[in-house]
Image (cartoon, rainbow, N blue to C red):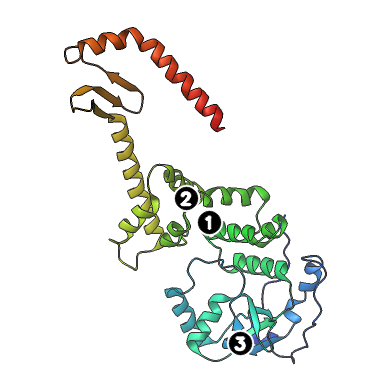
Amino acid sequence: MARNIFNQPPKDEKESAASSPAPVKSSKLPGSVGGLRDSLREITANSIRDIEPDRIDMDGLRDRLILEDSSIEDLAESIRKHGQQVPIMVRPSDQPDRYRIIYGRRRLAAIRRVGGTVKAIVRTLDDDASLIAQGQENNLRLDPSFIEKSLFIKEMQEAGYKPGVIQDALGLTRQGVSNHRVVIEQLPDELVRLIGPAHGVGRRQWGDLAALSEKVPLVDIALETLASLPDTTPSTDKFQAVYVACSSKARGAANQSARGQTTVVKDNSGSPVGTLSVDGKSIAIKITRKDNPEFGQWLEERAETTLRQLFEQWQNERGSGS
């Protein structure tokens, strides 16, 4: 069971801001994530500060495929009318009087459009604790899509975070993390970013698309397919369009392979020697006796021996290359 290391941020800022801000402790919490649960239970009692947005640096791993979309403008309009209802969380930067964001990237982007200061909880957390706080807060407020979680897991693993930290950040079991990673490893990053978060598209559907990567060039098909769609097409519809196009191409390639190809083999003078037919089930060499009666007779007498020699040669080459 994943650790819930923080309480939800206060929904009523007036209550949180009623008292004077308390100074933030400068000491690091012990260990990577040890002791965080008890320490963060009192998160709402910590100071909520008004900070200039340009003093906050984007930091950490991206947990959203799209940060600047139409919903940011909607959020900005809501903050313009009603004020910022939920604070973001930041941690002190190595640079004086600067901060690094832990969570609340969308709110920060919206407030940068509106103007004014941003309300932020300031916490001194190490990298592991910041990552867990970021993942858990996002899961509480706006559940990331399957593919966004998969990309986040991939980035966390590549950044060297331990399995337990990754599981806690997203509230997943070890098997859950593995299920996400298996799919994302088969998909080109460019394809995922072309399609977008595709909320509602789950592991099975993304897995089906990933399985087509061995049969057709997914990115090329996606670029061609998405070029014909309006820019405002929802990412879920983009996924469906790309999947249909890739499936169609894969079926066409399979049918072409099943029909096979026949090649006329010629000698140095350009005269036909025979034909080579290849399909999904067999390879056939055909010599027409009327065109090459003497060669046909010669080959017939040596066919079994020649085929056996070729097979032994293949075995030897395979053995020397292993």
On screen, residue 310 versus residue 126, left or right, reads left
Q: Quadrant of residue 150?
A: bottom right
Badge 1 marks a residue whose secondary structure is helix
Q: Please tell me whether residue 16 is drawn above or below residue 135 in the rendered image.
A: below
Classify mark 2: helix, strand or loop: helix
- In front: label 2 or label 3: 3
Going by the numbered disc 3, the residue's amino acid type is Arg
Tell me which residue sits at (43%, 57%) in the image: 191
Please rate how many residues cluster around mark 1, counting C-alpha atoms within 10 Å: few if below 14, some from 14 to 19, many from 20: some
Q: Would you say 163 lies left or right of 155 here?
A: right
Q: Quadrant of the N terminus?
A: bottom right
In the picture, the quarter occupied by the C terminus is top right
Residue 186 placement (x, y as % from top left): 50, 48
| Residue placed under numbered mark 2 in the picture | 206
Q: CA distance from mark 3 to mark 1?
A: 32 Å
Q: Residues within 10 Å of mark 3 (few under 14, many from 20)?
A: few
Taking depth in this image into account, of 321 and 49 the one nearest to the observer is: 321
Q: Position of residue 31 (x, y in %)?
A: 81, 67
Foreground of the two, 67 or 119: 67
**Label 2 with label 3: CB-CB less than 8 Å:** no
- Report the residue at 35% width, 12% height from top: 303
Q: Is residue 132 above or below residue 21?
A: above
Q: Mark 3 highlights which residue? A: 55
Residue 69 location (% of width, % of height):
44, 73
On the rendered structure, is 82 left or right of 305?
A: right
Tags 2 and 1 touching, CB below 8 Å:
yes
- Ranked by sequence position, the earlier of labels 3 and 1 is 3
In the image, which disc is placed on residue 146?
Answer: 1
Nearest to N terminus: mark 2 or mark 3:
3
